[in-house]
Image (tube, grey):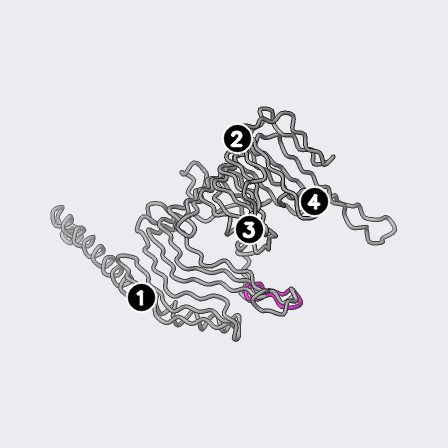
Amino acid sequence: MSTETAALPKSGARGRYWKHRLFLLFAVSALVSLAALGSSAWLVPYAIATYAPKWLKETTGRELTVADASFNPFSLKLDVSGVALKDGARVLAALDSLRLEGSWKSLANAAWTVNRITLNNPQVNAHADSSGSLDWARFLDALPKSERSEARSDSVPRIVLTNVEVRGGALRLTDERVGMSSAGQKRAEIAPLTFKLDRLSTLPRDRGDYALDATLNDQTRIQWKGRIGANPIESAGDVSITNLPLNKLSSLANVSLPIDLAGTAALQANYSAAIGTDFQAFGIGGGSLRVDKLTVVRGDDEAAVGSLVLAPISVSFARIEAATPARSDGRAAAASAAQTVYAIEPFTVNATQAKLSRRDAALPSLELGKLSNSLPIEIDVVQRKINIPKITSEGLSANFYRANGGEVVFPF
C-alpha cells in the first residue's frame, strides 16, 4: 500500500505532468496540420495536372491537358492555366487561365466559400452529329455513376461565391442536322461572353433565397433573387434585367429576323416556374417592360420610338400531359393528349416620340408625340381577339405618298 502511494506524483507535479502532455499533443497536432497544409501545395497541383487527366482518360477516353497548376495552402489561392478537354480531334472545352481565391470562412459558414474566381477566355463547344447525338451528352454518360449521385435529393449544395468574373468566354453549338453547306451557318455562338457575378449564396440564413447579381459584356445587368427546388423542378422569385441591347438578341437566340432592331430594354417582374414528368408551368406577374430609343428597320422603311412602356405584364402558360389508361385487351394505349393553356392579363401601353417613315421620303409618314390608353388592352388568346377600349394620342401628324403608278405607299 505505502509503495503504491509513493509512486503517485504530488498534486503540483501532476498538474505540470498533464500540461506537458497537452502541450506535446497540441504541438504534434500543429505540426501534423502544417505538414498536411504544406503537402497540399504539391498534392493539389499534382491532382489537377497529372492525376485528373490520367483518370479521365481511363474512365471516359477523353483527353484533358493542364499546362500548369499551383496552390498556396495558407492563402487558399489556386492558379491553373492552359486547360483543354478534347474528344478526339474536337475540343469540348478550353480555358486560358483560372484564379480561385478560397476563404477560411468555409469553416464558419459550413459551406464552400470563395472570395474571388476569375476565368480568362473559357470556351465550351458542343457538337451534334447527324443522328442528333451530342458529344457533351456522350462524355457525361461515360463518367462513372455512384449510387449516391443517382439518388434524388431536395437539398442544394451550400456555397457562397463572391466576385466571380468571366472574361472573353464563348459558347458554341454545331449541329450537322441543319443540313447547310456552310459550316459557319451550322453554328450557334454566344461570344464574346463577359460577365461579373457579385454574389451567389445558397445559405439558409439568406432568407431561404438565392441571390444573383451579374453584368454581361460590361453593359447588361441581371439581378435575381428567388428559390430553386427539386422533385419537381421549381423556381420562383424576382428578376430585373437592365441595359439589354436589342441588336444582340437575334445572335444570342440564334434567330434570323426579317428586321433590324436597335435600342435598350429593361424588364422587371416576379415569376414562378415548375417542370414535372407530366406538366410544365410558367408565369410572370406585376412586370414592366421599357424600351428606350427603339428602332425597327426593314429595307428602306424605319419605325422609331423614343420610349415604350408596357405595364403591368402578367402572362401564364401551362401544359399538362393527360395520362391515358391502359387498354383492357392488352394493346398499347394511344398517345397521351396534352392540354395547353395560355393567359395574358390586361395591360397598358405608353409611347413617346414615335415616327414611321421611308428613307427616301422628305417627311415621315406618321409622327406621334405621345400615345397612351387609359383603359387596359385585353387579349383573348382562345378567340384570337384584341380589345383596345380607349386610346389617346397627342401631336399626331400623317403624310401620304403616291408611287409613280398612283397607288398610296405606306411603310412596311
> Mark 3: which secondary structure?
strand
Image coordinates for residue 397, horizontal then vertical, percent: 57, 33
* Residue 112 appears left or right of 332: left
Label 3 vs label 1, nearer the camera: 3
> Mark 1: which secondary structure?
strand
Identify the amino acid type marked 2: Lys
Identify the amino acid type marked 4: Gly
Q: Earlier in the sequence, mark 4 or mark 2?
A: 2
Dot 1, crowdedness within 10 Å: few (<14), some or many (≥20)?
some
Dot 4, crowdedness within 10 Å: few (<14), some or many (≥20)?
few
Q: Is residue 269 visible?
A: no
**Residue 134 sits inside the magenta stretch:** yes
Q: Earlier in the sequence, mark 4 or mark 1?
A: 1
| Label 2–label 1 contact, CB within 8 A | no
Q: Mark number for residue 356?
A: none
Q: Which residue is mark 2?
A: 370
Front-most of 7 and 140? 140
